Image (cartoon, grey):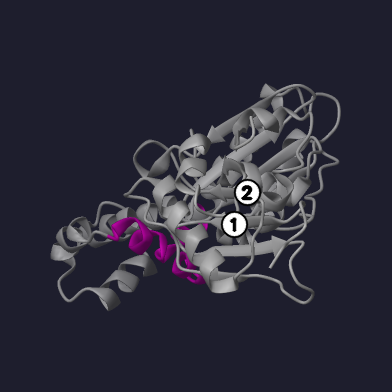
């Protein structure tokens, strides 16, 4: 099957799952989804295998491959293209997931995107430069993320258990999960999936916040951290000096009504006329935009390889 020269395989990758589409393909064909990537292994070889599997499955022959993936901070597009030498792919365009999430949410317009789930990253695009704030992982960053919320909830639960601080229903939450609360830390430390496991408590903290002041305080502090990142990122690219910047808030952490509301409250303290913007689309749409991305500060975060150059 011969596809048009504009045929592009776009993939949006996270550790939780992948989504893909092929533009210029047969009518009615939309794409598919699959399992996530293993963040503990190099990303490019996994992408090569993923592209090969998609091409084998569909029988389509796109000329370009564009991808945004978590962990692709310094991607090797040349290596990816070399690994696809036996396919129809002639051009590879790679970027980290924050870049494609931004493109999906705001296109190439100026503004700030904060993407907060298990981890968090904030990306701002100004008139001539970009700024990344946080996104430094669970050991060095992640302030306000679901992991941060879960980690603070676990500590608050144990402080309540010890009698060091006020009692909280978060202690009861842990008692429901562990037979012996004094051994809980050992089980969590030994769990290879401990980051996701700790982050999973964020939704339960949100539920507890209806009645528990300790849980509410944790969510309010998370919102404060997230708003602080937005303000810092905006100012670094010379946005928000005279009027509120365009800001999109993405990710599961913002599904908490309290986090979202307090986040807006904190930003309104900086910009009284601030209103949160609705994202244009998603990360897959952002990956689709990579090939045609023109003269934008975001181009500095995009890595290309072309078989004919």
Q: Determine the residue positioned at 32% across, 49% down.
A: 40
- The answer to whether residue 225 of the structure is visible from this angle is yes
Relative to the observer, which residue lies in front, 16 or 277?
16
Look at the numbered discs 1 and 2 and tell me whether their residues touch, using CB distance below 8 Å: yes
Q: Earlier in the sequence, mark 1 or mark 2?
A: 1
* Whether residue 142 is situated above or below residue 131 in the rendered picture: below
Relative to the observer, which residue lies in front, 19 or 90?
90
* Whether residue 30 is situated above or below residue 144 in the rendered picture: below
**Residue 103 position by quadrant:** top right
**Residue 240 position by quadrant:** top right
Q: Which mark is residue 66?
A: 2
For the magenta stretch, what is the residue range? 193-217
Is 86 colored magenta in this rendering?
A: no
74 displayed left or right of 150: right
Image quadrant occupied by the C terminus? top right
Q: Main secondary structure of the magenta part?
A: helix
Q: Position of residue 208 (x, y in %)?
A: 47, 70
Q: Position of residue 297 (x, y in %)?
A: 72, 27
Is 210 colored magenta in this rendering?
A: yes
Which residue has dot 1 on it?
11
Secondary structure of the residue carrying tag 1 is strand
Relative to the observer, which residue lies in front, 129 or 159?
129
Other-residue count near label 2 (Cα within 10 Å), few / some / many at <14 / 14–19 / ≥20: many
115 displayed left or right of 39: right
Calculate the distance from the C-alpha at mark 1 to the C-alpha at mark 2.
Answer: 6 Å
Q: Position of residue 185 (x, y in %)?
A: 19, 58
- The answer to whether residue 75 of the structure is visible from this angle is no
Q: Determine the residue positioned at 51% across, 35% down.
A: 78
Q: Which mark is residue 205?
A: none
Q: Determine the residue positioned at 74% across, 66% down.
A: 25
């Amino acid at each position: 099957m011969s596809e048009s020269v504009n045929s592009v395989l776009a993939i949006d990758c996270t550790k939780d799952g992948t989504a893909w589409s092929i533009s210029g393909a047969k009518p009615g064909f939309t794409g598919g989804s699959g399992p996530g990537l293993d963040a503990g292994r190099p990303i490019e070889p996994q992408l090569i295998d993923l592209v090969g599997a998609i091409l084998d499955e569909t029988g389509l022959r796109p000329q370009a491959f564009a991808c945004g993936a978590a962990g692709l901070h310094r991607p090797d597009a040349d290596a990816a293209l070399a690994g696809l030498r036996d396919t129809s792919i002639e051009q590879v365009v790679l970027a980290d997931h924050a870049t494609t999430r931004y493109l999906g949410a705001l296109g190439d317009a100026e503004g700030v995107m904060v993407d907060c789930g298990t981890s968090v990253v904030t990306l701002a695009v100004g008139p001539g430069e970009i700024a990344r704030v946080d996104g430094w992982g669970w050991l060095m960053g992640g302030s306000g993320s679901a992991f941060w919320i879960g980690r603070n909830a676990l500590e608050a639960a144990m402080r309540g258990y010890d009698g060091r601080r006020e009692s909280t229903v978060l202690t009861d939450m842990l008692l429901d999960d562990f037979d012996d609360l004094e051994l809980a830390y050992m089980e969590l430390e030994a769990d290879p999936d401990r980051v996701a496991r700790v982050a999973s408590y964020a939704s339960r903290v949100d539920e507890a916040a209806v009645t528990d002041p300790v849980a509410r305080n944790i969510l309010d502090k998370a919102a404060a951290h997230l708003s602080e990142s937005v303000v810092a990122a905006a100012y670094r690219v010379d946005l928000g000096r005279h009027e509120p910047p365009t800001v999109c808030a993405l990710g599961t952490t913002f599904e908490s009504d309290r986090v979202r509301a307090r986040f807006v409250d904190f930003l309104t303290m900086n910009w009284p006329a601030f209103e949160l913007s609705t994202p244009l689309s998603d990360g897959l749409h952002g990956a689709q935009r990579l090939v045609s991305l023109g003269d934008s500060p975001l181009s500095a975060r995009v890595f290309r390889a072309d078989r004919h150059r």
